[in-house]
Image: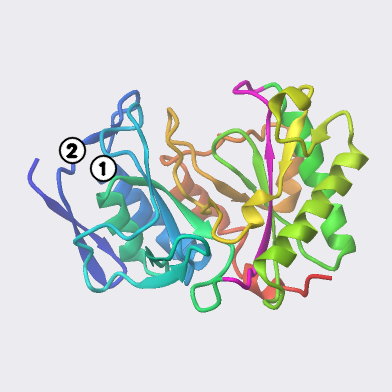
């Protein structure tokens, strides 16, 4: 198939090799991926705007090796926004910054199936405006979701006790992320320390279900409460990002009450049905920044 163009906001983005199959079990092509990101951009841009991105690229399809790219790909259009940030221990790096529908579509053309976002914005990369908890099961199976759900609900109560507003999202992979927006002020090290303390607190509340042990042999079949994504320059999967799994599941923002839905699962929604969900129900995280509160 000849190159084609996908309209994204005020731009048209060229898609090369549009019939390249990225999801071989499902026949999902690069063009399908680009059109998905164009469709969800009105919601997704809010959650990537002004944030440095890491690009998870599957150049030969999701059944092949992934390239986790931190620097902006060569040959980027001049309209793709960038920021140069410190790596702390290894110099500087220039990264793509989210904030425009066309950027999401252009990334799809780079075979970026799954963009990941920093917890800070580009103008103050060491001042997070999010605190993130990832509830990660101990193995590849699907038998730990009730532990994950219980942990997400419990950390939500802990965050509310701290004066923060929790938001939940299926990861599209194996777990749930719980995010709370912050007023910027404390640096990444401080947020990471507090996140670790809160992870310990929720694990102590549910000791049979949760752990903070990184050693798999020390988990005892329990779900890891991962607070390490709050470390400087670490990332979390972007809201509405497609995951490199059969069926193309999507990291899907939830209304908090949806955590109690008996039909909920980490991969419940996919590339094929998220646009309809957004049209019917809107974005549950719309206006999330307005809920930002100081980290006490």
- The part of the chain drawn in magenta is 126-142
Q: What whole-number distance in Å separates the C-alpha atoms at marks 2 and 1?
A: 6 Å
Give the side of residue 135 with respect to residue 210, left or right.
Answer: left
Q: Residue 94: x percent and y percent?
A: 36, 66
Scheme of image coloration: rainbow
Residue shown at 11% from the left, 49% from the top? 3
Circle 2 is placed at which residue position? 19
Give the total of numbered labels. 2
Q: Residue 184: x percent and y percent?
A: 67, 76
Residue shown at 77% from the left, 44% from the top? 152
Which disc is residue 97 wearing?
none
Q: Residue 106: x percent and y percent?
A: 27, 58
Is the C-beta separation of discs 2 and 1 under 8 Å?
Answer: yes
Give the side of residue 66 with respect to residue 15, left or right.
Answer: right
Residue shown at 72% from the left, 26% from the top? 144
Circle 1 is placed at which residue position? 30
Give the side of residue 176 with respect to residue 250, left or right.
Answer: right
Q: Nearer the viewer, residue 210 or 255?
A: 210
- Secondary structure beneath dot 2 equals loop
Pick the quarter of the image with the C terminus.
Answer: bottom right
Image: 108 above or below 128: above
Residue shown at 80% from the left, 35% from the top? 211
Q: Residue 287: x percent and y percent?
A: 61, 70
Residue 57: say if magenta.
Answer: no
């Amino acid at each position: 198939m000849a190159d084609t163009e996908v309209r994204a906001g005020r731009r048209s983005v060229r898609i090369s090799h549009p019939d390249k199959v990225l999801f071989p079990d499902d026949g999902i092509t690069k063009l399908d991926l680009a059109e998905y990101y164009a469709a969800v951009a009105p919601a997704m841009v809010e959650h990537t705007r002004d944030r440095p991105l890491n690009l998870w690229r599957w150049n030969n399809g999701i059944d092949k090796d992934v390239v986790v790219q931190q620097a902006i790909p060569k040959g980027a259009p001049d309209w793709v926004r960038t920021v140069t940030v410190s790596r702390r221990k290894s110099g500087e790096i220039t990264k793509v910054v989210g904030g425009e529908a066309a950027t999401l579509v252009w990334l799809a053309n780079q075979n970026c199936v799954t963009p990941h976002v920093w917890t800070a914005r580009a103008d103050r990369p060491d001042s997070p405006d999010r605190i993130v908890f990832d509830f990660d099961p101990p193995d590849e199976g699907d038998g730990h979701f009730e532990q994950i759900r219980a942990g997400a609900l419990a950390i939500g109560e802990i965050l509310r006790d701290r004066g923060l507003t929790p938001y939940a999202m299926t990861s599209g992979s194996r777990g749930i992320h719980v995010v709370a927006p912050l007023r910027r002020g404390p640096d990444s090290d401080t947020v990471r320390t507090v996140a670790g303390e809160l992870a310990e607190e929720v694990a102590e509340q549910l000791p049979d279900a949760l752990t903070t042990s990184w050693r798999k042999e020390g988990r005892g079949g329990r779900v890891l409460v991962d607070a390490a994504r709050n470390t400087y320059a670490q990332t979390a999967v972007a809201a509405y990002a497609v995951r490199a799994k059969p069926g193309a599941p999507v990291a899907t923002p939830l209304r908090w009450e949806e955590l109690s839905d008996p039909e909920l699962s980490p991969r419940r929604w996919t590339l094929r049905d998220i646009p309809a969900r957004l049209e019917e129900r809107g974005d549950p995280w719309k206006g999330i920044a307005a809920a930002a509160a100081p980290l006490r």
